Amino acid sequence: MRLAFSLSGHRPSRSAVAAAVAAEEAGFDEVWVTEDYVERGAFALAGAIAQATSSVQVGIGVVNPWTRHPVVLAMEFATLDELSGGRALAGLGASNERWMTGQLGIPFDRPLSRLAESVSVVRRLLAGEHVQHAGAAYTVDTALSFRPLRPDLPIVLGVKGPRALELAAESADGVLLSILAGPDYVRLVRSRVGPSLRLAGYVGLSVADSGAEARDRIRPLVARFLGIHGDHLITRSAGLSPAQCAEFRAGLVAGAPRVDLVTDDLLDRLVAAGTPDEVAAAFARFAAAGLDVAVVRDDPDVEPEETLRQARAAVGA
């Protein structure tokens, strides 16, 4: 199982570039740049990272087909691949209604259909084709004015539901799984997308000499994201009932995430938290479930070198 480091959009840009360099020096295989609204922009930051590093792959994890037209996405991905010397990973996702409609005023209709259309156009443009496309969301009649460095630049979809996973299996080179995608969910996804699709996932990490301290530190994050996921394949795979999911969602909506409901057993099913030995065992469970790349989340309140050291130790590297 390879290691990746996901940079927080809350981290100042220059600090994020330095953290990416530290990840490369620590032997990480990939660095992923998130783009959550309204945080720092992914492509500018990824370009700076591409110039500051030499071997680590640089992923965009992920951008959506609402705020960027697929032609613009192809332009951006091809430019990043050129800047990095063929180290880019193109991450796309459908986004969500809260960001698109609630914050940006963009109607959020047929998101999977729009994502599928965008993936098709982006892939053909990156392959150097002149694309003539007339779909429900986009009309395109153009080609890139330059030859992309790699016509087969990997496209990774950040998706989580059954229909979205089917789309990934049909049209993508990999999947980037959401935070709290525990080993049981990873195993389920692997069974649905097949053995060859590249499977990466965000893994919550908390390590301390005291297992109780490490687990207490990550409970708020787990409670918050359980509220975000709600009753979903991710939560059901972890053994949560619809009633329990409703409690987590209600806590999030009320501004009081249900940290009290996050048991040690639940943590073991969702994240890697505890003593160094317990975290190493957790990473082994993710690998055995079929995860190819463990994407460790950046905590802007923690020095990145410490997070990187803990993750490397956990996988025995």
Image (spheres, rainbow, N blue to C red):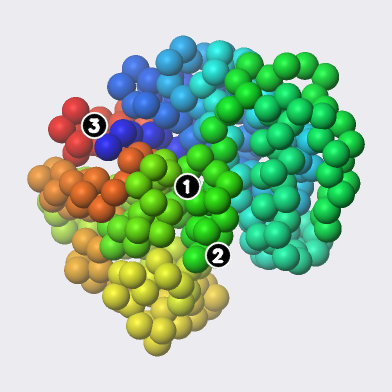
- Does residue 212 lie above or below 300 as drawn? below
Which comes before the other along the chain, label 3 or label 2?
2
Distance from Cα at disc 3 to Cα at disc 2 = 34 Å
Identify the residue shown where x is 46% and y is 12%. 54
Determine if residue 238 is in view.
yes
Local crowd size for mark 2, using a 10 Å CA cut-off: few (<14), some (14–19), many (≥20): few
Mark 3 or 1: the one toward you: 1
Local crowd size for mark 1, using a 10 Å CA cut-off: few (<14), some (14–19), many (≥20): many
Nearer-the-camera pick, 174 or 240: 174
Distance from Cα at disc 3 to Cα at disc 1 = 23 Å
Quarter holding the C terminus is: top left
Q: Is residue 114 left or right of residue 255?
A: right
Q: Position of residue 208 (x, y in %)?
A: 18, 46
Report the residue marked by disc 2.
163
Q: Position of residue 88 (x, y in %)?
A: 55, 26
Nearer-the-camera pick, 13 or 268: 268
Report the residue marked by disc 3.
312
Mark 2 or 1: the one toward you: 2
Identify the residue shown where x is 80% and y is 64%. 107
Local crowd size for mark 3, using a 10 Å CA cut-off: few (<14), some (14–19), many (≥20): some
- Point out the residue furthest to the bottom here: 243
Q: Circle 2 sits in a helix, a strand or a loop, which is it?
A: helix
* CB-based contact (under 8 Å), mark 3 and mark 2: no
Identify the residue shown where x is 49% and y is 35%. 32
Q: Circle 1 sits in a helix, a strand or a loop, which is it?
A: strand
Indicate the amino acid at tag 1: Val
Report the residue marked by disc 1.
175
- Does residue 126 lie above or below 166 as drawn? above
* CB-based contact (under 8 Å), mark 2 and mark 1: no
Would you identify the image quadrant in which residue 109 lies?
Answer: bottom right
